[in-house]
């Protein structure tokens, strides 16, 4: 008789625990989606104002990167190493670098096991990927701020953005209603 009482109590406690956990995850998911939509809305709005037919890409991971790159008509020039009149090529450079990073990260974990030389190779591998991606992100945000009439903030904001990405979303909200200078 006593065993069934404890069993029912344990089942009830477990059920309540699972229920509260699911409720917490549901609320967390809804808040996460709301924050994501709020963060990407300025990019969507700027893309719509410029007549992009695929402005909805602003809400898709990697698509928002593409939209941000395409919002500026300026030549993409990354330290005179990568110069592209068509900014889509910079997006492909980012995708290729990310693809290579994802494919090689598992083998690099084994190379990391080799003392000193493996560590150096792994460090250079990570550094090369971050240099490419951060360079593209810096240039992308710099050009966007120049295009939307904020040249006095373009350099410092695009550099600080590399370490505190939330900063750029503040600038996105500031510039989303401005008209872009297509000759900047």
Image (cartoon, rainbow, N blue to C red):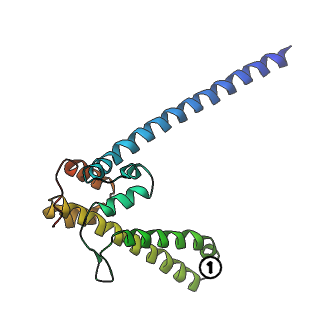
Give the farthest residue toward the right. Answer: 1
Determine the image quadrant of residue 11.
Answer: top right
Circle 1 packing at 10 Å, graded few (<14), some (14-19), many (20+), is some
- The foreground one among 113 and 105 is 105
Give the SS element for disc 1: helix
Residue at image position (33%, 72%) is 86
Q: Is residue 58 left or right of residue 116?
A: left
Could one spot residue 151 in this view of the protein? yes
- Give the x, y percent position of residue 84: 32, 76
Compared with 155, 13 (above or below) is above
Give the farthest residue toward the bottom. Answer: 117
Q: Is residue 80 left or right of residue 133?
A: left
Q: Is residue 77 left or right of residue 94?
A: left
Residue at image position (47%, 35%) is 30
**Quarter the C terminus occupies:** bottom left
Determine the image quadrant of residue 116.
Answer: bottom right
- Give the x, y percent position of residue 45: 28, 47
Compared with 14, 75 (above or below) is below
- The foreground one among 182 and 174 is 182
- Give the x, y percent position of residue 76: 29, 73
- Give the x, y percent position of residue 39: 34, 46
Determine the image quadrant of residue 180.
Answer: bottom left
How many marks can you see?
1
Could one spot residue 163 in this view of the protein? no
- The foreground one among 182 and 39 is 182
Q: Which residue is mark 1?
A: 111
Residue at image position (44%, 59%) is 62
Q: Is residue 177 left or right of residue 38?
A: left
Compared with 6, 67 (above or below) is below
**Quarter the N terminus occupies:** top right
Residue at image position (64%, 30%) is 18
């Amino acid at each position: 008789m006593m065993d069934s009482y404890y069993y029912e109590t344990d089942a009830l406690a477990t059920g309540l625990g699972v229920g509260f956990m699911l409720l917490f995850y549901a609320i967390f998911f809804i808040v996460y989606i709301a924050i994501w939509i709020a963060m990407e809305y300025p990019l969507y709005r700027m893309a719509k104002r410029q007549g992009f037919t695929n402005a909805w890409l602003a809400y898709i991971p990697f698509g928002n990167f593409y939209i941000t790159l395409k919002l500026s008509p300026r030549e993409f020039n990354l330290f005179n190493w990568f110069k592209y009149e068509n900014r889509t090529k910079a997006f492909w450079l980012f995708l290729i670098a990310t693809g290579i990073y994802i494919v090689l990260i598992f083998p690099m974990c084994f190379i990391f096991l080799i003392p000193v030389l493996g560590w150096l190779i792994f460090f250079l591998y990570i550094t090369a990927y971050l240099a490419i991606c951060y360079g593209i992100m810096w240039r992308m945000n710099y050009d966007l701020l120049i295009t939307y009439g904020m040249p006095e903030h373009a350099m410092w904001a695009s550099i600080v953005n590399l370490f505190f990405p939330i900063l750029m979303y503040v600038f996105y909200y500031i510039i989303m209603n401005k008209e872009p200078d297509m000759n900047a």
